[in-house]
Amino acid sequence: MIIKRSHVRSVRVTRGGFTLAELLVSMAVLIIITLMLTQLMTNATAINRTAHKHIDTDTQARVVFDRMALDFAQMTKRVDVNYYVKQRAAYNGHGNGHGWGRGKNADQGSDQIAFFSAVPGYYPSTYSVGQQSPISLVAYRVTESNSSDPAYGRLVRMAKGLGWNALDSNPNSNQTNTPYPIVFLPQTIALVGRPWAAAITNSNTCNNSPNNSCDPDYEVIGPGVFRFEYFYLLKNGFLTDWPWDRRDDTTNRFTISDPPSIGLSQVESIGVAIAVIDPAGRALLDAVSPDQIVNLAGDFPDFKSAHGLGNQSKTIGDLENQWKTIVESTAQTGRSPSGLVVPPEAAKTIRIYSRYFDLKTL
């Protein structure tokens, strides 16, 4: 069989490799695909990391709010019972709980609150009384004054077990080996001194003076909670930082105990807002300065209402939205509103939560 040369030549051509242009196009396509896959994996990793951070802060917020729900649900709501809650006047024996600690800013800072609740509390074995009361003095605060305290810049809770008025022994306020009995008005939390003083102070005094605020009965309940604010939802729908309707303030009252019949009767529920940072974000802030977390807390505005004669200036969600705006801005610029240096990655780990607790008042 004779094969023509032209045919052989055509066969050789068909068996040739890729051209240079084809190889270049193939490599370009491969590089593009690789870059796309790398970007997808990077995004997935970032999303997964962020999700884990949110899981941590979500868990902390859930624990804090669940504990508060139990405490508020069992709150002793009587007109002859003392409360340490924020209200119109400065603290005069019946409490205002506003801005204690205050971080490094004079006009802002986490709130404090103290009240009696039918929940079990710490009852040290050194107490000589043979009976234990289910009533406790419950208090919440963010430790902001003693930077050497392990709880510095963290939400802490105290539940101090109390005895009843009918106790055979009536220990005075300066004794530490016996429980001080629960009493009603005109007795106030402030006038008892030790061991109740820690519920209404947030100083760095850690000795046996009546101003002792380093009470061992405080425990860290929110290690990532660095900002704590509360306010009131009244039964008429107003949101305010006074626990009564100022339009009806014809008696020019100063506290919920003046007149004593008011109490918390006008409050439908207490709203609580918290700012939570995850451990990695806190570590970044602490690397800048040990005080940075408390300084940052001072940049989150207080809840301040201006109802006056009924002008409603606050609605549900306003405060939380202000806080979220600050977090987003800080994460973008690396600076807080007051100019604090905040690593953007630290700001990105902060989340804002709020919840309302029904007081079931009459």
Image: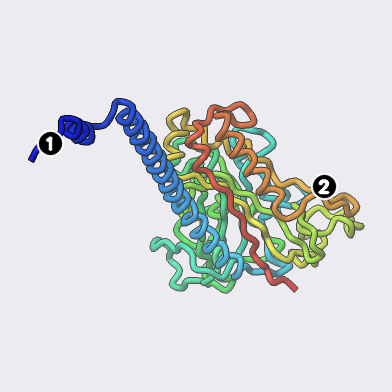
Residue assigned mark 1: 3
Disc 1, disc 2: CB below 8 Å? no
Q: Residues within 10 Å of mark 2 (few under 14, many from 20)?
A: few
159 w.r.t. 77: above or below: above
- x 79%, y 62%: residue: 237
In the structure shown, which secondary structural element does the residue marked by tag 2 occupy?
A: loop
Residue assigned mark 2: 306
**Image check: 281 left or right of 173?**
left
**Image check: 165 left or right of 222?**
right
Distance CA(mark 1)–CA(mark 2): 103 Å
Residue 12 image offset from top left, x and y in percent: 18, 32
* Type of colouring: rainbow
Residue 352 image offset from top left, x and y in percent: 58, 49
In depth, the one of 128 and 323 nearer the eye is: 323
Residue 98 image offset from top left, x and y in percent: 68, 47
Give the label, 1 or 2, closer to the camera. Answer: 1
In depth, the one of 353 and 271 nearer the eye is: 353
Q: How many marks?
A: 2
User: The residue under label 1 is which amino acid type?
Assistant: Ile
> Can residue 237 be seen in the rendering of this structure?
yes
